[in-house]
Amino acid sequence: MSLRFYNTLTQQLEEFKPLHDNVVRMYTCGPTVYNYAHIGNFRSFVFPDILRRWLRARGYTLDHVMNITDIEDKIIRDSKAAGKSIDEFTSVYTTAFLEDTATLRLERPERIVPATQHIPEMVEAVQHLTERGHTYVSDGSVYYRISTFPEYGKLSHNDFSGIRAGARVDVDEYDKDDARDFVLWKAAKEGEPAWDTPIGKGRPGWHIECSAMAMKYLGDTLDIHTGGVDLTFPHHENEIAQAEGITGKQFVRFWLHAEHLSVDSQKMSKSLGNIYTLRDLKERGFAPEALRYLLASVPYRKKLNFTFDGLKAAATSIERLRNYKLRMETDKFPDGTNAELISRTQAARAAFDAALDDDLNTAGALGTVFEYIRDTNTAMDAGQFPAGNVTDALEFLDRFDSVFDVLKPSARIGGLSDSEVDALIVERTAAKKSRNFGRSDEIRAELAAQGVILEDTKEGVRWKRS
RNA sequence: GGCGCGGUAGCCAAGUGGUAAGGCAGAGGUCUGCAAAACCUUUAUUCGGGGGUUCGAUUCCCCCCCGCGCCUCCA
C-alpha cells in the first residue's frame, strides 16, 4: 500500500506524492512567542516531526518551513506589561522554544522564519491582493474583502453565504464591511510598534505572515501544510484566501491537522491550572522522552487526554524497549541463523511500515514493534534466537527509533562515570560470591540512587542508566 | 444553530463485513540468594443504546444518548 494522508480539504484519505521530484515542500504554523510553549503546543509539533521522519524513511527530501510569530497583539500587550521591547521579550521565548523542541528531539525544519524579518514580503502580498481587487481600506487599515473570494470556506467546510454584508457585525473595534473580512495590515496605533511602508505605517495582520513566508520559500503551491485543528478556521482558511487570491493557483495540496490535547479530560486553561510546560514535567522527574513517546503514540488525528498516569505508562513502555535493545546487544546467543525468525522480522517491518503509511498510524506501528519484541524475547528465553539474527532485529529496532526516537536516554547532569559504576559492580560481585548479600544489596541500592539499575543475568551483571 | 471529531477491557489504544492488536496497571506462576529483566497463564462472549441490511456487523445504513473541538484569540 502507498503512503496516504487524511486531507482536511477533501475530507478524505489520499495517496501522497510530492508535486515536484522527490522534494516535499511543507509548512508548519509555528509558535507565537509570548510565553513558554505547553505540552499541547508540543503535540502539534511532535506530529510534523513524525511526519518528517516518515517522509524521509520513504525516500523523500524535505523542504520544510516553520514560522515564528514574533509580532502580534498578545506579544505587544505582554511585552508592554513586562516593560521590555518586543525583541527583548520575544527572544526569551523563541530561545526557550528552540531549546524545548531540541529536548523533545524534534528535528529542525530546514528553515525557521521570524515574521518580523519578512515585513517587505507581507507588504508586497497585500499590494498584490489590492491589485487584484481583494482589499479595501478602513481607518487606515487594509482588509481582505471576502466576497471577492467565492471559495472561502472550502477548507473548514463552512457555508458563509448566510452571513453577508449588511448583517449586523459585532461591535468590533475595527470597521469591517462583512463579518468574514479580516485585517491584512493594521494601521499604526500610539505606543505600538509599526513599520513605515508603501501601504501605510502599521504592522501585519496575523494571517498574512504565513501566506507570505510560505510562498516566498516554497513557491505558489505547497505539498503539505500542518497545524493544530483550531487553526483550520479562520487562520488556514484565510491563508488560502490570501495565497490563492494572489496566484489563482492551489495554495496547498494536503492540509494536515493535529488534534488537540486535553488534560484530565479538560481543556487546558489558566483558571484550571492545568497548563504544563516541558519544564514543569522535567521538574516532576519525567524524562523528555516519556512525553515525546506519549505525544507520538496516539495517532495525530485523535484527541489525546494527558494524565500523569499516562506519562508514567509511556516511561515504562520506553523501559521495555530499551531493555530489549540492551539484551540484544549484551546477551550471548548460540551460533547460526534462524530463517524463520528472519521472515518474522521482515513481516514485522512490513507491518510497521504499512501502519505509518496509513496516515501515520503510530499506535498500530507500536503494536507491531511490541509484538515482535515479545516473540523474539520468547525465542531468546528458549535459546532459539541465534547470533545470526541479532543484526536483523537491531535494524528493525533502528527503523522504529528513526521515527519515534526514544531509545537513547537523555543526558543526566552529574552522576557516576562508567568506570565508577564498573568498580562498584566488581565489588558487589565479590560480595555476592562470598554470600555477603547485605553488602551486595547495599551497593545495588547505592547505584539505584544514582540512577543506575543492575540486572543479574547468566552472562553476568548488566547495567543501565534509568 | 452550522461544521467537525470521538464513545472498544481499570487506564491508553489498533482494527476489520467472518467472529476483538499492542502498551500500562492488576492477579497467579517460572526464573533468581533476594531483586531486576524476560516469559507463561489470567483480565472485553464483547466493541455507547436501539433498529435495519446481511448467512454473518464492533466494522455498512437509520435514529437516539453521551463527551469534545471550531464557528472571536488559541497548537
Image (cartoon, coloured by chain):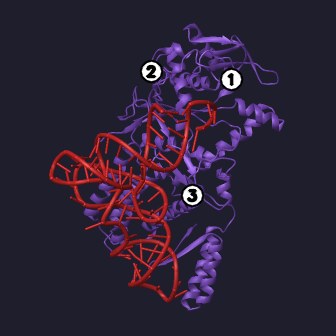
Chain colours: A purple, B red
Q: CA distance from mark 1 to mark 2?
A: 34 Å
Secondary structure of the residue carrying tag 1 is loop
Which residue is labeled 1 in the image?
A: A171
Marks 3, 1 in one chain: yes
Identify the amino acid type marked 3: Thr
* Residues at marks 3 and 1, CA–CA distance in whole angstroms: 40 Å
Pointer 2 residue: A250
Of labels 3 and 1, the one closer to you: 1
Does dot 2 land on a helix, a strand or a loop?
Answer: loop
Quick check: marks 1 and 2 in contact, CB under 8 Å? no
Q: Which mark is residue A365?
A: none
Q: Residue at x 44, y 33 (%)?
A: A8
Of mark 3 and mark 2, the one earlier in the sequence is 2
Q: Which residue is mark 3?
A: A307
Q: Is residue B2 above or below residue A352?
A: above
Type of amino acid under label 2: Gln
Number of numbered callouts drawn: 3
